[in-house]
Amino acid sequence: MVLSVEIVNFNDHDDLLLKSDILKINQQADTYYFIIDNDFMSGDESFAKVVSTLKILLNDWVKQIEELTTGVTYLPFDFSDEYIGCLKVEYIENDKLLLSYGYTAQYKGWSIYPSDTKDFKLKSSDYSTETVPVPVSKTDTINSIHLSIAKLEQSL
């Protein structure tokens, strides 16, 4: 599996996990900005809202990867006060992508809603990588995100 995203011990702090053996990461993040996302289910701070918001985000990842036929896209994950941690996905050819994890201080967690990341656009100079870029299959990456979405649905 290329990557997985799951909620662990829901409490709004270090309860979101992005795991990728390929990238050699177990990136923990907070669901706090998913909870206070006022663009979706405003006023609701439930586990169900966090799961629904995360599903929206992951479905957006799938859409961006499916539409990627040239260049680079950045997929936000870790919405923190001073930065946003994200995956960098670069199109190579056919079914091949180059995947890495890093962050940007160009955006802050409070400056964009996890349920609506269409304005999350970066220049390469805005991104700092934390992992070595690794070639991956586009199909396998999409399938692993779909698997994470299915597991989230089962948690409700």
Image: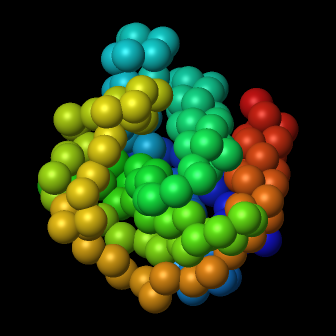
Residue at left offset 45%, top offset 59%: 71
The residue furthest top is 42
Return the x and y of residue 67 as percentages of the image width and height.
61, 43
Nearer-the-camera pick, 84 or 48: 84
Quarter of the rendering occupied by the N terminus? bottom right
- Answer yes or no: is residue 141 visible: yes
Image quadrant of residue 6? bottom right
| Colour pattern of the rendering | rainbow
Residue at left offset 44%, top offset 44%: 31
Residue at left offset 58%, top offset 71%: 92
Please state if 93 lies on the left or on the right of 80 as rendered. right
Return the x and y of residue 60 as percentages of the image width and height.
57, 37
Please state if 3 lies on the left or on the right of 139 as rendered. left
Return the x and y of residue 84 as percentages of the image width and height.
29, 54
Compared with 34, 69 (above or below) is below
Nearer-the-camera pick, 50 or 150: 150
